[in-house]
Image: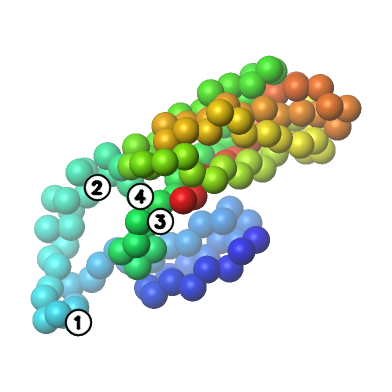
Amino acid sequence: MTEKTIYAPIAKVDREERMVYGYASTEAVDSQGEVVRKEALAAALPDYMRFANVREMHQPFLSDSGKGVAVAPGGSFIPFNNSSFLNAPVVHMSIVSVNGDTTGFWSAVDVSATGFTGHIFDHTGVDAGGVTDWSANT
């Protein structure tokens, strides 16, 4: 796993689930002398959640992910939740299960700005399908 440096206070880290928790903003005075009120954040949240992307230090790097996604034998198209990708991102899949096991390998093909086709192969090489967690990053 690649470590990443970020500039925000992290309240909680769950390494097993690969989740971090923290505050998007507080009502403290920021470096530009402004205060973002919690009411303003609450009002902006529904619009933000249409894309729900996180950017690294205001750069155009985007990421998206899915957990517990079923992949059919022969492959399944998996659409991105984040519709802000302008180009095809790099996709990584991890196998949650394949034929009741976790031994196998994966393939992400036909990756575009809107999604990809995921395949999960069992240990014999059969495109058996299964369940995956995935991430996409620019």
Q: Picture coordinates of residue 131 (x, y %)?
A: 65, 31
Q: Which mark, residue 31?
A: 1
Task: Give above or below for 49 relative to 60.
Answer: above
Disc 2 marks which residue?
48
Disc 3 marks which residue?
61
What whole-number distance in Å separates the C-alpha atoms at marks 1 and 2? 23 Å
User: Sequence order check: which comes first, mark 3 or mark 1?
Assistant: 1
Disc 4 marks which residue?
53
Is the residue under label 2 in contact with that under label 1 (CB below 8 Å)?
A: no
Name the one closer to the observer, 90 or 33: 90
Q: Secondary structure at mark 2?
A: helix
Badge 1 density bin: few <14, some 14–19, many ≥20, Cα 10 Å: few
Which tag is nearer the camera, tag 3 or tag 1? 3
Badge 3 density bin: few <14, some 14–19, many ≥20, Cα 10 Å: some
What whole-number distance in Å separates the C-alpha atoms at marks 3 and 1? 23 Å
**To which quarter of the image does residue 103 belong?**
top right
User: Sequence order check: which comes first, mark 2 or mark 3?
Assistant: 2
Is the residue under label 1 in contact with that under label 4 (CB below 8 Å)?
A: no
User: Sequence order check: which comes first, mark 1 or mark 2?
Assistant: 1
Q: Is residue 87 visible?
A: yes
Looking at numbered disc 3 in the image, what kind of residue is underneath it? Answer: Phe
Task: Give above or below for 129 relative to 39.
Answer: above
User: Sequence order check: which comes first, mark 4 or mark 1?
Assistant: 1
Looking at numbered disc 4 in the image, what kind of residue is underneath it? Answer: Asn
Q: Is residue 130 visible?
A: no
Q: Is residue 110 shown left or right of residue 112? A: right
Q: Is residue 33 shown left or right of residue 101? A: left
Residue drawn at the location 37% of the way across and 73% of the way down = 8
Looking at numbered disc 2 in the image, what kind of residue is underneath it? Answer: Tyr
What whole-number distance in Å separates the C-alpha atoms at marks 2 and 3? 16 Å
